[in-house]
Structure formats: C-alpha cells, structure tokens
Image (cartoon, rainbow, N blue to C red):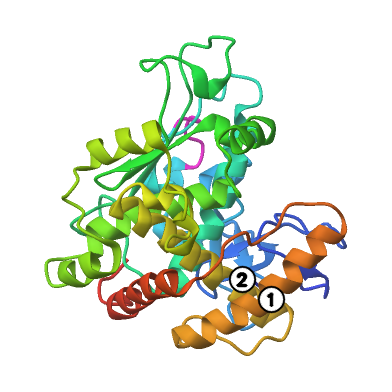
Amino acid sequence: MRKFECRCGNALFFKNSLCVACQCEVGWCPVCRAIQTLIPDEGQSGYRCGNPDCLAPLRKCHNYQVEQVCNRCLPAIDLDPSQADVPSSIEATTRAALCDSCRFNRTIPDLSKPGNREKWARLEAAKRRVLFGIDLLRLPYGDVDSGLPLPLSFEFMEDLPPTGRRWHQVGEAEQIYTGHADGNITINLREADPVERERARVDFNEAQRTLIGHFRHELGHYFWQLLVTEDWLPRFVEAFGDHENPAYGEALQLYYEAGPPADWNLSYISAYASMHPWEDFAETFAAYLDMVGMLDTDRYLAGGEVDPAVADLPTMVLRYQAISLVANELTREIGLIDIVPKVFTDPVVQKLDFIHQLTRHSSGRLAK
C-alpha cells in the first residue's frame, strides 16, 4: 500500500478519513486515485479534491457520509442529489450513492446490534485494500450493471440464532459459511471480531487468519470461475490437478476426516490447499495477492525497485523472499507470529507461475 499527502504536508494512509495534523477531512478520490484532502465546495458537489492537479468535484460515498464505515468519494456528476439522505440499509441506498467499493454489497450487517457497525467498518477497510490490489493488476470485475458474465457481490452475515457456544461449533442450520458461489462472496461477520478470529486460527491450526486473507481467498474462487476458461483448463489441471476427480464434496469430506497429507508443505502453500485443486488455486491466488501487495508497499515506502504490476515472477519472488525475511524477524523480535508464514517451494512457484500468466493475460481485457 502507498503513502499519500495532505495539503498541509502531513502523511496520509489508505485508511485515513481525517488528517491528524490539520484535522481536515480526507478521502479517496476516484479521479486521481489517491487519498486526498477534501476541500468543502459551496456548489452542488459538496467537495473538491485537494490535489491541485485534479480538483475534481466529489461527493462522499453514502457509507462515508452516513454510516462512517467508508472513506471513499465518487464523482459528483454520478450522483442524484435526491438520494443524499436515504435510509441506512443497503436495499434503500441506491448504488448511485455508493463508491466503487461499497456498490458491490448485497447484504450488510444488522446495524441495530451493538458492535456490528465496528465489525462492518473492519470488513469494508479490508475489502477496499484488497480491491486496490486487484485494480493494480487490472483484473476484470464488475457489479450487476457492468455486463460482466459473472457479476461480483458481497454479503456480510452473522450466525442465527445466537447459541452461546463458540461460533464455529454451532449447528449446521445456524451457521453462516464464509465462501463463494457464482460471484457472490459471503463473509461471516464474526470474522471481524479479532478475539473470535484468533480463537478460530488457533483451533484450526492455521498459520494466518485475517479478513484480508478471507477476501483474497474467496476472490481466488471468483477469478477461477471468471478467468479459467476452456483454453486455460489443461494448464490448470497440469499445475493443480484434476478438479473433477475426486469431486469437491468427496474431497472435502476426506480432508476433514483424515486431514492433510503429512508432507503437504512440500507441494502446497497451506494445508487447506491440499484439500482440492479449487482450494489449492484459491490459496495460491491469495498468496500471489499477498506478494503483490507487499511488493507494492515495499516499492512506495521502502524504496524497493520491483513493480509487481509489470515484473516477471522470478524477480517478484526473489524480492518477496528478501522482505519477508526481514518482516518475520522484526515480528519475532517482539514476540509476534510471522507476517509471512508461507514457504515457496518449487511446486508452489510453478502454481504461482500459472496465476501470474493468467493475471497478465487477463489484465485490462475486460472493463471493470
């Protein structure tokens, strides 16, 4: 991720909605694609971008202005002023009043419940960061109005009814499963509770469990369905295995009965990746996005020279391994878990190469 600058000269970051130095409101400008100072505009637009080379008329996203869970703006000309004070449900809020991240939401949390707004804000912050990486790679995605053959949408839902038990031990009919189905990504709201998520990470023996990781994994399933067309299937099978044999349900049952193979770390990015080729692709895709994000941050904040949008895979992997070593040692120095628990063995790199070639081939081919 990148660092930006307020008009007062103070550093701004991707999550900011306020400059801590001058107390000016800031937000994402979709025209110059940066976090910028929001200059109040007495005209109809509401604000102007503080970048003197942009000055685009802007209006806050509904979820920024009303719900305080977003920090993005949209071009004022895209809005109907009559929608400025719509009710705070996703059904009542027209997509025209939502930014290019919030407009993908199909279901939002019940905001009448204490704590849900804070959890929703964490989900939106993670989603915005992940979509930034997708845009960096110029991968195609779109909402229901985009004309894309597989529209993308998100649902943030919680287990019902409450049971008093641990959230991952509730009954089958009571639990919301985080997953992907035909373009719709569902995230269980309790993943936005740091305590519950850490408990699940330990119980499931996962090296890493984050909201960003969930989004990147589920987007892996989305892009598999969108991009791995018939001409790519033979190469996919060669890299990841036959996705039709065994069937997904059979592989899932076997995985939870027997667990991963003892030597899974020699060929897979994670234990869960060994369950089925679809999960192997999603886990490897998420790892690829992790690498892209860290390399982009390294380039803009630490002077790294690798541009993940154009670099070849060997160069990306070499630099990623170098910064991962430093990052892990820094966290170990203060007793935290490794930031990058993944190991890129030769079989994993071959799978990463398939994803690298697929993303390069698909970059910019379909409009968002």
Give SS at disc 2: helix
* Vertical placement of residue 179 versus 238, above or below: above
**Residue 164 picture quarter:** top right
Nearer-the-camera pick, 109 or 48: 109
Task: Report the label total.
Answer: 2
Name the quadrant of the N terminus. bottom right
**Residue 65 picture quarter:** top right
Q: Residue at x 67, y 71 (%)?
A: 324
Q: Position of residue 312 (x, y in %)?
A: 45, 88
Amino acid residing under circle 1: Ile
Q: Which residue is mark 1?
A: 323
Q: Badge 1 local density, few (<14 within 10 Å), some, or many (20+)?
A: some
> What label sits on residue 294 in the rendered view?
2
Give SS at disc 1: helix
Q: In front of the other: label 1 or label 2?
A: 1
Nearer-the-camera pick, 244 or 345: 345
Side (left or right) of 246 relative to 325 = left
Side (left or right) of 309 relative to 203 = left
Q: Residue at x 58, y 83 (%)?
A: 318
> What label sits on residue 173 in the rendered view?
none
Q: Residue furthest left?
A: 230
Amino acid residing under circle 2: Met
Cα separation between marks 1 and 2:
8 Å
Side (left or right) of 324 relative to 358 = right
Q: Residue at x 36, y 38 (%)?
A: 255
Q: Which residues are magenta?
A: 84-89
Nearer-the-camera pick, 13 or 260: 260
What's the magenta bit mostly, secondary-structure-wise? Answer: loop
- Disc 1 vs disc 2: Cβ atoms closer than 8 Å? yes
